[in-house]
């Protein structure tokens, strides 16, 4: 999700389409929050990952 957010940010910047920029920021923030929560061992969406 973070990678998709970065791709949309770059695409929005290069093409000048503001909706891509906005969606990219949203995906980047949500992906970062989920990655941080998952890294701390909390359940995300009712799922826990065991490594």
Image (tube, rainbow, N blue to C red):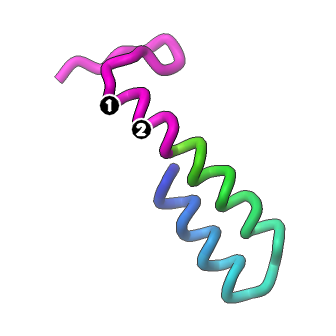
Please give the name of the residue rendered at 49% of the width and 11% of the height, measured from the top-left corner.
Answer: 46
Question: What crowding class fits label 2: few (fewer than 14 Cα within 10 Å), some (14-19), or many (20 or more)?
Answer: some
Residue 5 position, x and y percent, is 58, 60
- Name which quarter of the figure residue 19 lies in: bottom right
In this rendering, position of residue 18 left or right of residue 14: right
State which region is magenta. Answer: 32-51
- Farthest residue in the top direction? 46
Residue 26 included in the magenta stretch of the image: no
Q: Are marks 1 and 2 in contact (CB under 8 Å)?
A: yes
Residue 48 position, x and y percent, is 35, 15
Give the alpha-carbon distance from disc 1 to disc 2, as whole Å. 6 Å
**Secondary structure beneath disc 1?**
helix
Magenta part, dominant SS: loop
Of residues 13 and 46, the one drawn nearer to the viewer in this rendering: 13
Residue 48, placed above or below residue 27:
above
Residue 32, placed above or below residue 48:
below
């Amino acid at each position: 999700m973070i990678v998709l957010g970065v791709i949309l940010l770059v695409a929005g910047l290069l093409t000048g389409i503001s909706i891509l920029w906005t969606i990219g920021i949203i995906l980047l923030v949500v992906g970062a929050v989920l990655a941080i929560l998952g890294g701390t061992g909390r359940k995300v969406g009712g799922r826990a990952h065991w490594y």
